Image (spheres, rainbow, N blue to C red):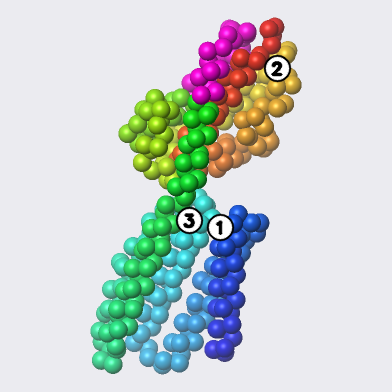
Amino acid sequence: MKQKIYILGLISAMILSTGVIFKMEHWPAAGIMITLGTLLLVLIFFPAALINNYKAEGNSQNRLLYIVTYITCFVVFIGILFKIMHWPYAGVTLLIAIPFPYIVFLPVFLIVTSKNKNFNIYNTVFVLLLLAMNSVFSGLLSLNVSKETVDDSYNISRNYNKVGAAMAQLHVIVNGSAVNMKIDEIIKITNNYQDLILKHEGMTREQWKKDPWNLVRPDNINTAASILIDNGERIPGMKLDKAITELIDLMKQTKGFRDAAKALPAILDLDEANGKDDALNFYSKHIFVPLSWALIYLDGLEANLNMIKASGPAIN
């Protein structure tokens, strides 16, 4: 039995390690392997190993310690899994996972082992070392995005802002058209979103466009969504998603814009229409992302809409 448990643990660790390598190299199936390896560890290997060790030890006084040990492993590994996979509420799960070993496991461990006269103090030191390593690893995970990736995204943002500024200077042929008025409405919404987000981060839109590197928490996934919810949006990005949908419908009905309406979803990086779930798709794709990426998408959206205005037909 013990040999089978060791083999299961080895297989689980190999699948998880391979998935991590695939994730680092951005190869296909990385997420599947990481998820499978983690679930094998927390749902099969850990409970089997702990139960086997508990039966071999034959000491019912340590039952609570075994239970708490498993719960701690489950919470920590699931929190790490959510963060690696960028799933919703990843920040919350990791926020729970980091202090959990200290608040729950460590007190139980010290109480139970203090009653055991034959317990070796070096085991306590070893456990504390493992907890410290867990905190360091979890802290590194909370960084979420490499500095190089963030820097590259900032360069994209600056290019978007340059294009948007240039397009804004061009003469718009269809001033006063219904399409242009709707585009102006969407640009106003994007600017409002950016103002709300940047104000929360202690910046202005002008500061963002001039030097985006001053953004303090560029990799925080929850920030943009939380700010929009706090400002009255049940689903973050719903107002913007609705306005863009209305623009596409309007362009389909307007002479000279029908071909552009077909291309607009691709230009603005939108999913195909999906009924009532459109806002949820928009939210997960452009709002529930690292903070810098949400701001950059809004920059790109404004630049692309200005280009559509500048290249519009002379007659509606």
Q: Is 176 displayed left or right of 46 in the figure?
A: right
User: Marks 1 and 3, how far apart in space?
Assistant: 14 Å
Counting from the top left corner in percent of width and height, residue 314 is at: 68, 7
Is residue 206 visible in the rendered structure shown here? yes
Say which amino acid is labelled 2: Phe
Say which amino acid is labelled 3: Lys
Circle 3 residues within 10 Å: few <14, some 14–19, many ≥20? many
Please name the predominant secondary structure of the magenta segment in the image. Answer: helix
- Disc nearer the start of the sequence (2/3): 3
Please report the residue visible at 46 percent of the width from the left and 82 percent of the height from the top. 50
Counting from the top left corner in percent of width and height, residue 57 is at: 41, 92
Q: Which mark is residue 24?
A: 1
Q: Is 154 displayed left or right of 254 in the figure?
A: left
Q: Is residue 188 magenta?
A: yes
Q: Nearer the viewer, residue 150 or 13?
A: 150
Q: Quadrant of residue 269?
A: top right
Residue segment shown in magenta: 162-189
User: Marks 2 and 1, how far apart in space?
Assistant: 43 Å
Tell me the residue that label 2 is attached to: 257
